[in-house]
């Protein structure tokens, strides 16, 4: 199984449900408040670990109750925490999540995530060398992402970038990435002009792009340089939070199987994740994925 280094965010998720999303200036009553562990980096690390990968997390936490909760949760999910950075003067990051009608709105406060520096990445050079796949998102500073990509590229590592929330990287940096995993909204920023469509962006990109498309599946360029669509699996949706992160973590787990096989496995894992509540709580284990009756033909 792959050795994966996740360089990314660790957030405490504060979640509630509402009948509908409020209008500007409007106050609504929500359901009970649930506090759980999240952050795109954290979620993707947990997804990969549950599916059997050897995962190490490089991230930053505040010296606070949320930080302790997040640290313990990583360890409970068999993720290597030897490279978690503790910040005494900066709180742990949070994500405020509101759900309604199987959709969600998310606001992230970056906290300690924003303190991860390029120097921290340089200090982790040996760690990068020791892993097969480097998985990144965009909830940490841009210059830190760039340094991680440059060092990983120097050692010919597989670099997977989930560009969320979308922030532009220099073209010469993006071209060092092995796979870009945007959704249907984020991909537009990867185009050269406002008239570009997801299809043209995928076909013209030097870096392989796999566009996650929610209930429609994924869109990508196959090994014959042709646009290809793999549909999502039809399952009863309980909670879509974390489905994209599940896909990213799963993709890193299964990429050694070949591109199409990895995508099918990742679609299955993300489909299973939405059948249960919670971002990490819904993520399947490898045994659950392999034994599920939802994908039997």
Image (cartoon, grey):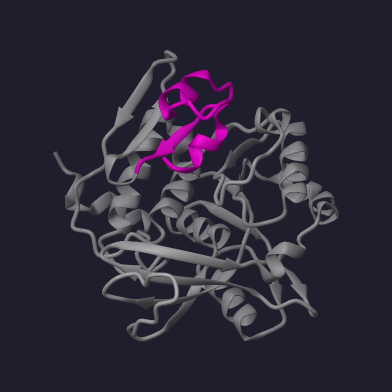
Q: Residue 171's quadrant in the figure?
A: top right
53 horizontally vs 119: left or right: left
Q: Residue 152's quadrant in the figure?
A: top right
62 horizontally vs 194: left or right: right
Q: For the point 40% across and 78% down, which residue is it?
A: 26
272 horizontally vs 88: left or right: left
Q: For the point 50% across and 61% down, which residue is it?
A: 43
| Closer-to-camera residue (152/177) | 177
Up-down relation of residue 206 to residue 296 (above or below)? above
Q: How many marks?
A: 0
User: Where's residue 144, x and y in %?
Assistant: 76, 50
> Image quadrant for the C terminus?
top left
Range covered by the magenta-colored residues = 184-213
User: Where's residue 92, x and y in %?
Assistant: 66, 75
Query: In the current view of this chain or complex, which residue is farthest to the top?
Result: 224
Query: In the current view of this chain or complex, which residue is farthest to the front?
Result: 25
Query: In the current view of this chain or complex, which residue is farthest to the left?
Result: 297
User: Where's residue 84, x and y in %?
Assistant: 71, 66
């Amino acid at each position: 199984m792959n050795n994966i280094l996740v360089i990314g965010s660790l957030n405490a998720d504060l979640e509630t449900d509402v009948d509908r999303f409020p209008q500007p200036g409007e106050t609504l009553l929500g359901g009970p408040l649930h506090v759980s562990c999240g952050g795109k980096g954290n979620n993707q690390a947990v997804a990969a670990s549950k599916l059997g990968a050897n995962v190490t997390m490089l991230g930053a936490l505040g010296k606070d109750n949320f930080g302790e909760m997040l640290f313990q949760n990583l360890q409970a999910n068999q993720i290597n925490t030897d490279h978690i950075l503790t910040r005494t003067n900066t709180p742990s990051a949070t994500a405020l999540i509101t759900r309604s009608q199987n959709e969600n709105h998310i606001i992230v406060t970056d906290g300690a995530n924003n303190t991860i520096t390029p120097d921290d990445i340089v200090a982790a050079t040996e760690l990068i060398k020791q892993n097969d796949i480097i998985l990144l998102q965009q909830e940490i500073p841009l210059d830190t992402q760039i340094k991680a990509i440059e060092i990983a590229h120097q050692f010919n590592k597989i670099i997977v970038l989930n560009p969320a929330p979308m922030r532009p990287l220099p073209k010469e940096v993006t071209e060092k990435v092995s796979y870009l995993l945007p959704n249907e909204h984020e991909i537009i920023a990867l185009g050269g002009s406002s008239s570009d469509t997801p299809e043209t962006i995928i076909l013209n990109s030097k870096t392989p792009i796999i566009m996650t498309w929610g209930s429609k599946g994924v869109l990508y360029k196959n090994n014959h340089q042709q646009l290809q669509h793999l549909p999502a699996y039809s399952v009863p949706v309980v909670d879509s939070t974390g489905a994209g992160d599940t896909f990213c973590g799963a993709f890193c787990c299964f990429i050694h199987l070949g591109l199409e096989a990895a995508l099918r496995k990742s679609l299955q894992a993300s489909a299973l994740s939405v059948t249960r509540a919670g971002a990490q709580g819904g993520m399947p284990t490898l045994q659950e994925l392999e034994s599920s009756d939802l994908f039997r033909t």
